[in-house]
Image (cartoon, rainbow, N blue to C red):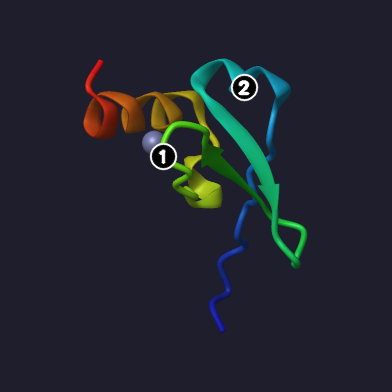
Amino acid sequence: MSSKKKEKRKWLDEYVQYGYTCITEHDGSQRPNCINCNAKLSNSSLAPAKLRKHYPKLHGD
Ligand SMILES: [Zn+2]
């Protein structure tokens, strides 16, 4: 096991504006779910910069 403490990011309602909904996994961790392509991003993607990146990359701008 790693000794590094894994910080879990938390969903914020304002992330809705980036085009995502929130999925809560069985372990309680939250993940963003793209409403455009239904892609589930990782918990570490719960940050505005990362949420924004998905769109130009997968959906054009
Ligand atoms: Zn998408």
Question: At 26% from the left edge and 34% from the top edge, which residue is drawn?
Answer: 58
Identify the residue position indicated by label 2 in the image: 16
Q: Which mark is residue 37?
A: 1
Q: Residues within 10 Å of mark 1 (few under 14, many from 20)?
A: few
Quick check: 49 left or right of 15? left
Q: How many marks?
A: 2
Nearer to us in this view, 28 or 33: 33
For the residues labelled 1 and 2, say whether their Cβ atoms are less than 8 Å apart. Answer: no
Say which label, 1 or 2, has the lower sequence index. 2
Residue 40 lies, with reference to residue 36, above or below; the image says below
Lateral position of residue 12 relative to residue 45, left or right: right
22, 45: nearer the viewer: 22
Secondary structure of residue under mark 1: loop
Which residue: 33% across, 26% down? 55
Q: Residues within 10 Å of mark 2 (few under 14, many from 20)?
A: some
Residue 13 x %, y %: 72, 23
Compared across the picture, whether 16 is left or right of 13 comes to left
Percent x, y of residue 4: 56, 66
Q: Residue at x 63, y 52 (%)?
A: 7
Residue lying at 44% horizontally and 47% vertically, measured from the top left: 39
From what the image shows, is residue 51 above or below residue 33? Answer: above
Q: Residue 29: horizontal and vertical position, in percent?
A: 70, 55
